[in-house]
Image (cartoon, grey):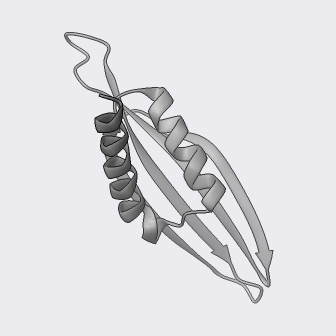
Amino acid sequence: MDNEILYESLKKEEGNLIFLNYYIIPENISADYCDLKCYGIKIEKTIIYEGGGKTVESRQINNVFYRYSDVEEFLKSIVKKRVEPCDLRETVEKYIVESIDRAKKSA
């Protein structure tokens, strides 16, 4: 697997300090025969507690998109909604169904 690319980092303070990091996960499909890539998504949530200590929650889904512009469009929408790791799978599934519906209507 290639390196993950930090797309955006959000910070929220409400007593505890909360960071939401959104990543693009690029992977080569077959480096021997071509230079095609596919892209996955990772969300990492870190909570730093006032009294000390921290927790980190992370979810990753690989090989969701085959165009960089599609993964950027998806990430832009989930960053705006501040999607958390626990909601990543449901959000990806909903996005794919909506994309298929849009494609059917334009065909």
Percent of width and height locating residue 6? 59, 42
Up-down relation of residue 98 to residue 103 (above or below): below
Percent of width and height locating residue 43? 50, 57
Who is closer to the viewer here, 39 or 27? 39
Residue at figure coordinates x 64%, y 75% from the top left = 47
Task: Left or right? Give the position of 87 relative to 76.
Answer: left
Percent of width and height locating residue 58? 46, 64
| Residue at the extreme top | 33
Which image quarter holds the N terminus? top left
Residue at figure coordinates x 65%, y 46% from the top left = 8
Task: Left or right? Give the position of 89 relative to 52.
Answer: left
Up-down relation of residue 69 to residue 60 (above or below): above
Residue at figure coordinates x 34%, y 48% from the top left = 96
Total marks in image: 0
| Residue at the extreme bottom | 51
Who is closer to the viewer here, 38 or 74? 74
Up-down relation of residue 31 to residue 21 (above or below): above
- For residue 32, what is the image quadrant? top left
Q: Is residue 66 visible?
A: yes
Percent of width and height locating residue 99? 37, 42
- For residue 52, what is the image quadrant? bottom right
Residue at figure coordinates x 44%, y 68% from the top left = 87
Who is closer to the viewer here, 77 or 18? 77
- For residue 45, what is the image quadrant? bottom right
Q: Is residue 63 visible?
A: no
Up-down relation of residue 74 to residue 55 (above or below): above
Which image quarter holds the C terminus? top left
